[in-house]
Image (tube, helix red, strand yellow):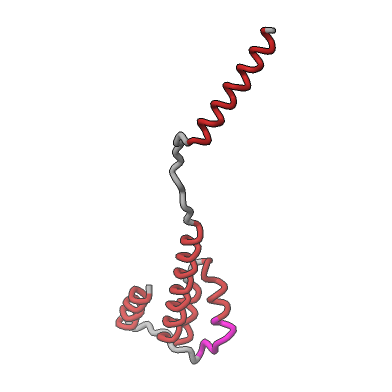
Amino acid sequence: MFSRFTTIINSLRNLGKSYSNQELVRKILRCLPKSWTPKATAIEEAKDLSTLPLEQLLGSLMTHETTMKNHENVEVKKKKSIAFKASKEESESDEDGDVALITSQFKRFLKNRK
């Protein structure tokens, strides 16, 4: 964004239209997306826009962007979950349970028969 902005400003300067540093800083802050509104407001209130160099504004915005990306990566890592593949294996305890079930059913059968 900054390189496009600089290209446009340089082209306008070649055509005879120049802007003060304060106007350039305000234009950049104004064109930021809505998600950047808190950062733009913080910069406007914390710093003197008439003396804020364009390079310092760019550095502050790049630092904020890096921080936002790091927070997104942390959130993505937290959302990852581990899935295990379920498999059923016959074990001795299952076989014991089956034998016990058959035995109890056979005993009921014998009781009902008598």
Towards the viewer: 82 or 86? 86
Towards the viewer: 44 or 81? 81
Q: Is residue 32 above or below residue 18?
A: above
Query: Is 30 left or right of 13, judged from the image as shown?
Result: right
Is residue 48 covered in magenta?
yes
Q: Position of residue 105 (x, y in %)?
A: 62, 19
Is residue 82 covered in magenta?
no
Q: Position of residue 22 (x, y in %)?
A: 48, 86
Q: Position of residue 67 (x, y in %)?
A: 47, 74
Residue positioned 48% across, 53% down in the render: 81
Farthest residue, direction bottom: 51
Q: Is residue 76 above or below residue 1?
A: above
Assign the C terminus to one quadrant of the image. top right
* Quarter residue 103 falls in: top right
Assign the N terminus to one quadrant of the image. bottom left
* Quarter residue 108 falls in: top right
Instruction: State which region is magenta.
Output: 43-50
Farthest residue, direction top: 114
Residue positioned 67% across, 7% down in the render: 113
Residue positioned 54% across, 81% down in the render: 43
Q: Position of residue 53 (x, y in %)?
A: 44, 89
Residue positioned 50% across, 61% down in the render: 78
Towards the viewer: 106 or 79? 106
Query: Is 19 left or right of 113, judged from the image as shown?
Result: left
Q: Is residue 104 above or below residue 60?
A: above
- Total of numbered circles in the picture? 0
